[in-house]
Image: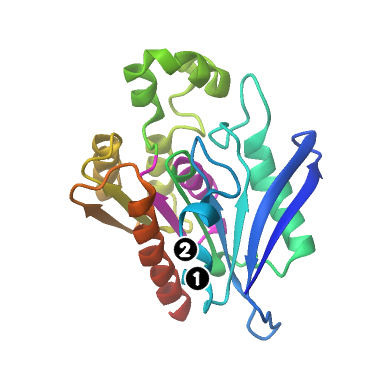
Amino acid sequence: MARMNTRFYSTTLDLMTTVNVIIPNECSTDRPPATLYLLHGLAGDSESWLQNTSLERYASQMNLIIIMPNGDRSFYTDMADGNRYWSYLTKELPAKMRSWFPVSAAPERCFVGGLSMGGYGALKWGLNFPEKFAGILSMSAAVDIKAMWERTPEHAHEFQMVFGHPSKFDHSINDLFDRVNHVSIDDGRKPEILQFCGTSDFLHADNLRFKAALDQSSIPHTYHEKTGASHEWAYWDESIQVALKWIEKKLEN
């Protein structure tokens, strides 16, 4: 397994950015690797998953390319006052990755995941483009932005810089609960969601509400909860192991 740190100029962001890519030692055209886009949290960057978990070791025997971009503090959104990270993530990045690496665009071999802000980004991407993915990994995700916005007035300015005025949030592409409803009633592809959250996480109640919304939907999903686990890398290191085994199983079917 090889690891590449790539620094390049993004025309969408109009700046230099980085992406880390884990690639199997052998990539055969007869058996092309599957793809996992793995997103970092609010205080992280493209190195976070590699520095804080044993991701490389866990994935070392898998036929899987793992792509870890840098999303800054954007919530993977075309910011109201800032850069266009949503356009970068969903358009420019996949095109660049496919031109440089043997990245699969086949939906049955493509996954997206992340933790905290990255879990939000993964759900947002997967639920806005369900036809592109076989599965979504949500780890301690910031699933209810509006609730977070309302209960942390000290961060209201940052939320507004990202999402604009609160009145514009509901029923937008940024509203995960609304996206669940859209995907649920649509006849198209429904990527399976694997959701993780610890009971001591400050986002636990939000994740339970999101689970309840999924329970009422037609979207296939599984919820994992660990008693006492908080918003911490020790839990995410455990969760990514479960998630990779889940991906492996889905690829076998």
Return the residue at label 2.
Answer: 54
Q: Are marks 2 and 1 in contact (CB under 8 Å)?
A: yes
Residue 217: tell me if it is visible. Answer: no
Location of the N terminus by quadrant is bottom right
| Any part of residue 7 in sight | yes
Q: Residue furthest bottom?
A: 30
| Residue 165 to residue 105: above or below | above
Secondary element type, mark 2: loop
Residue 202 is covered by the magenta coloring: no
For label 1, the residue is: 57
Occupied quadrant, residue 80: top right
Residue 135 within the magenta-colored segment of the rendering: yes
Give the x, y percent position of residue 31. Answer: 63, 83
Span of residues in magenta: 120-141
Amino acid type at mark 2? Ser
| Protein image colouring | rainbow
128 or 137: nearer the viewer = 137
Tally of numbered tags: 2
Q: Is residue 18 above or below residue 202?
A: below
Specify the quadrant of the image occupied by residue 109.
bottom right
* In the image: residue 187, left or right of residue 150: right
Towards the viewer: 153 or 253: 153
Position of the C terminus, as image quadrant, is bottom left
